[in-house]
Image (spheres, grey):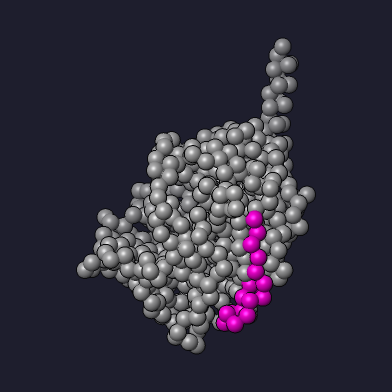
Amino acid sequence: MKQAATYFLFLLFLNINFYSQNVVLSRELPSIKKNVPLQILNCNKNYFYVLRYNKISHDFILERRAKRTAEMLSFKALRLDTINSKYFDLENLDYLITEIDHKFYFLFVREYNKSKELFLNEIDTLGKSSGYIKIGQIEQEGKIIDFSIEFKITDSNNLLIIAAIMYENNSTKKIALLFNPKTHNPIWIKKLPFENTYTGYSASFTCNNNNDLYFFQIKSHLNGYKRIFQDNRQTSAPYFFYDSLILVGILADQKIPIKHVLPISNLTALHSATIAVFDKKISCFTHFSINNSKNESVQSFYTENISSDFSKIFNSKTHVFPKNIINQLTFYDGTDFDQAGYKDYYIHFFQKHGNNIFYQAERKEVNYVKEIIYANINEQTNELADTKVIPRKMSYFEHRTRFSKIGNSMVFLSDSSIINIHLENKKNIDVLCSTFQFSKFEKQNELWNSNLVAYIQSYSGTEKKKLIYTNAQYDAVPMKYSGTQADFVFYLVNGDKEKFGFVDSIFLKK
């Protein structure tokens, strides 16, 4: 009997660790509970960054660690308390991190009750900091009801910053700033035309390498309210009809905008409208729902390649979801309709790579994340190379864990595949994208006893699924992840101890 019990424990240990033989784990490191990891930046073959939030000192901490060993190479307290106040909410900080030419850049918005300020900090590999550089600010005054600052990194490694002021009469004023983080100087500042319900509202800003500015102008109107299931209860939510989408460009050497109307209208839902920029052309990618001839709401993609000055349309096409994808997305989930077109999706990932444009949109509620729609577009032929539904189903309570985004799907590109890594229930180990059924897919509610899995979509359209790690003694924790390296770095914790895991791209290709 004792021998049988020993054999059973051996099999259990083997089952837990067998799939980890292709994963390199660092040595055990001390974990300070007040230092909560927020994001991993993996953009160098020799090291990676970890950004943490210290709940006691109310500050951010930057760590640069060596690949494979996770040994500390440099440590920097970002000292946000030097510009702090009781209104400065670090736990919900709007920030961006990136590395350019071996220098780390930290961009964030400081928010007061009646003002917002944008700061940039540049840190070299030795931990030497430029100090906080104030890029700009926006203040509430008069009949302003809201104001915001959004930002992104362009393909030229410049910072594109959009400041918006919303007034009581539903009009909006926006200012665009293109900023060079290396020189700490603006490249240009553009005041955009006033926006209102008649003109439509701008979204999805981007710049090409010529520093031309592009964005969408979206016109919509309220069409009613629908029942949705959110936060474990049914509620009503407004829904809109989208009348038109206009592509707008402001060329670097011109002041008057150029416009191009996309040939899609009367949309029942607009899930995303995004722009990919190339040398002499831009690619529009729109994900929407629309009623067909049978009055059924169906999801579709519209793609268009157009010259950078809008003088020539190279090609355009509407891609209706394949039948197998529609079948996978047809089910009741707390609403009055089972059709795929009535489900709401939000952009999760959008990036060009070679001749491909990769797009992902996720369905989610408060603390409940669900399946992801994936599409691969060949930008030269404008053909839909691949479409899949990536399985995911995780519900959790933020107040029960110090890791508030454990349902996140970490996504990155290798030289031949796009890879999503997230947690799921162990009962789903054999489920692939092609066999996923939402109602039969088991939900996971916590870190413990879950699988960290990789869904791998090759650029040619084939799919694989790899088990990377099973949470047992240590828990792998998904978090915000970004980087340009083909290998993958993840974080594990066990009480006051932590480790880092490293997965080589060769394993993910097998």
Residue drawn at point x = 43 percent, y = 71 percent:
161
**Would you say residue 411 is visible in this rendering?**
no
| Residue 463: image location, x then y, percent | 73, 49
- Name the image quarter holding residue 391: top right
- State which quarter of the image contains the N terminus: top right
| Residue 283: image location, x then y, percent | 61, 70
- Name the image quarter holding residue 377: bottom right
In the rendered structure, the answer to whether residue 169 lies left or right of residue 35 reads left
Q: Magenta-highlighted stretch: main secondary structure?
A: strand
Above or below 471: residue 350:
below
| Nearer to us in this view, 487 or 147 | 147
Residue at far front of view: 293
Query: What stretch of residues is rendered in magenta?
Result: 305-320
Residue at far top of view: 1
| Residue 232: image location, x then y, percent | 43, 35
Residue drawn at point x = 41 percent, y = 67 percent:
201
Q: Is residue 508 magenta?
A: no
